[in-house]
Image (cartoon, rainbow, N blue to C red):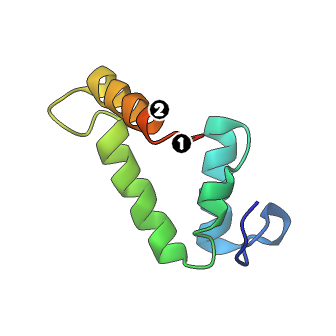
Amino acid sequence: MAWIRTIEESEATGGVKEHYDELKKEWGFIPNIRKVHSIKPELMRELLSFTHVVTRGGTSLGRVREEMLAVTISALLKCKY
């Protein structure tokens, strides 16, 4: 749970709702780490774009290598995500 104010799914409108709907479709839920960005929809949009480039096959490394790097770094940092 975030310690800062976030927009809950039931309160979301506009771009935040669209983002939440996309996350819900892809993941089945809305991760708290994404809700943290809900009070700044423009930041949320840019973060999604950045994430897709880095972990969705947007580099010359390819999707599998990108995902392996992301998992390895997350494990080293003891990140739950």
Q: Helix, strand, or loop for circle 1?
A: loop
Q: Identify which residue, 72 or 51, lies in the foreground.
A: 72
Quarter occupied by the C terminus:
top right
Q: How many marks?
A: 2
The image quadrant of residue 68 is top left
Asked if the residues shown at circle 2 and circle 1 are in contact, with their CB atoms under 8 angstroms apart, the answer is: yes
- Residue 71: horizontal and vertical position, in percent? 43, 30
Quarter occupied by the N terminus:
bottom right
- Residue 4: horizontal and vertical position, in percent? 70, 76
Residue sitting at the far left: 60
The image quadrant of residue 8 is bottom right
Residue sitting at the far top: 64
Identify residue for label 1.
79
Q: Relative to 43, does residue 61 appear above or below in the rendering?
A: above
Q: Amino acid at mark 1?
A: Cys
Q: Which residue sits at x=47%, y=75%? A: 42
- Residue 79: horizontal and vertical position, in percent? 53, 42
Q: Amino acid at mark 2?
A: Ala
Residue sitting at the far right: 10
Label disc, if present, on residue 44 of the rendered structure: none
CA–CA distance in space, label 2 to label 1: 6 Å
Q: Identify which residue, 5 or 58, lies in the foreground.
A: 5
Q: Identify which residue, 16 or 43, lies in the foreground.
A: 43
Neighbour tally class for label 1: few under 14, some 14-19, many 20 plus, Cα within 10 Å? few
Identify residue for label 2.
75
Q: Which residue sits at x=71%, y=73%? A: 13
Q: Identify which residue, 15 or 50, lies in the foreground.
A: 50
